[in-house]
Amino acid sequence: MKKKLAVLGTGFGAFSALKELDTDLYDITVISPRNHFLFTPLLPSTTVGTLEFRSIIEPIRNIKDIYYIQAECIKIDEQNNMLICRDTDTEKEFNISYDILFISVGEVTNTYGIEGVKEYALFLREVTDSRRIRIKVINCFENASLPGISKEERKNFLRFVVCGGGPTGVEFAAELHDFIEEDVSRKYPELKDDIEIILIEAGNKLLNSFDKKLSEYTMKAFKRQKIKVKINQNINKVTKNEIYVSNGNHFKYSILVWAAGNSPSELVKTTSLPKDNRYKILTDDYLRVIGHENIYAIGDCSEIPGKAFPVTAQTAQIEGKYTGKLLNKLAKGKKVKTFKYRDFGMLAYIGSHKALANLNQYKGSGFATWIFWRSVYVTKLVSLKNKILVLFDWFKTFVFGRDVSNF
């Protein structure tokens, strides 16, 4: 009889494992409030219409021979091998039993308890977040085009603020710059000189995980693109119309995109599974939760003690692929090897058809790296459909520009 395998999550880790798992060996149930896999590295491109939303998602139900439940796991009862779940729509609660549990729930956006962030900032983790940003961006340009408004009001409508100098914040600022240069300048020519993009970073440089020279290159590129970078600054308070910064200044804004860090999900915070002081679920070298033979945890929500891997989609993908193969081997009674992490490096887009490559063998920047960036991401997309749609979207944007329709 096949063992019941419950999978929590539909991100890079869970999806990579599901692609490896043999459904002849396991009865697989996937539980997640999101019924699709999202290729998050290209999410910033959807905020301004460079790519369309459905081009970078893959429905979980496209995976054959699995059972999917759109719900959120709110408690793990590891003593009885039971999951307490809640439907996100009807709020109905129910239980799911398991023999083996696979946890890949990721993390959530960290607001650091700053007043007003949760209420007024826009996050960028899901397609729904991207759609909100896209609608808001177009509304800002339409509002700034209204007759009879003062120059100061127009500038306030056109002041876009990004908090967080990591890949997400940098890439969103870059995509917004491209949108302004390539489309807004033609479709809203009277607004171009009043637009302001501000990127606020608490640290002393952008892209902290990248090589120092690449970080400096990004700062220079943003300066040429007239993106105002404010390093060594924090946001202390956010109201509906104003942002208060740690240097004592405050200013009005139209959009605040918050990409300043991650924090554990409520499930991970409240579970009795072993965790460190940062609420990371602790696992052994087989990615098995310490003290639990039948529970595995991977990705952002977990950590092997003394082995802190980068908190990236790439890490979750590698761990997911390993765990899927490991579970297949265990079901067949084969020997398994411990997990070995291999860092393939990182890529980032910085606008104006320039990108960065922070790889072990190569560190580069510029137009050629942008071609490489696009090529890598196309190959990494999980289905032929996604590959075709993304290539078509890029072609469509190049020929016709980005669509500024709002609906």
Image (cartoon, rainbow, N blue to C red):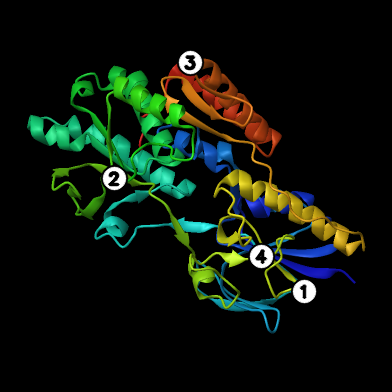
Give, as a three-letter code, the residue at label 3: Val
Disc 2 packing (10 Å; few <14; some 14–19; many ≥20): many
Indicate the secondary structure of the residue bearing disc 2: strand
Q: Which badge, 2 or 1, comes first in the chain's sequence?
A: 1
Against 375, is 82 above or below? Answer: below
Alpha carbon distance from label 3 to label 1: 53 Å
Alpha carbon distance from label 4 to label 2: 36 Å
Q: Residue at x 56, y 48 (%)?
A: 310
Which numbered disc, 3 or 1, marks the residue closer to the eye?
1
Give, as a three-letter code, the residue at label 4: Thr
Indicate the quadrant where residue 338 lies.
Answer: bottom right
Q: Which badge, 3 or 4, comes first in the chain's sequence?
A: 4
Indicate the quadrant where residue 21 lies.
Answer: bottom right
Disc 1 packing (10 Å; few <14; some 14–19; many ≥20): some
Give, as a three-letter code, the residue at label 1: Asp
Residue designated by label 1: 99
Q: Are marks 4 and 2 in contact (CB under 8 Å)?
A: no
Residue 304 place in picture, x, y as percent:
64, 60
Q: Which badge, 3 or 1, comes first in the chain's sequence?
A: 1
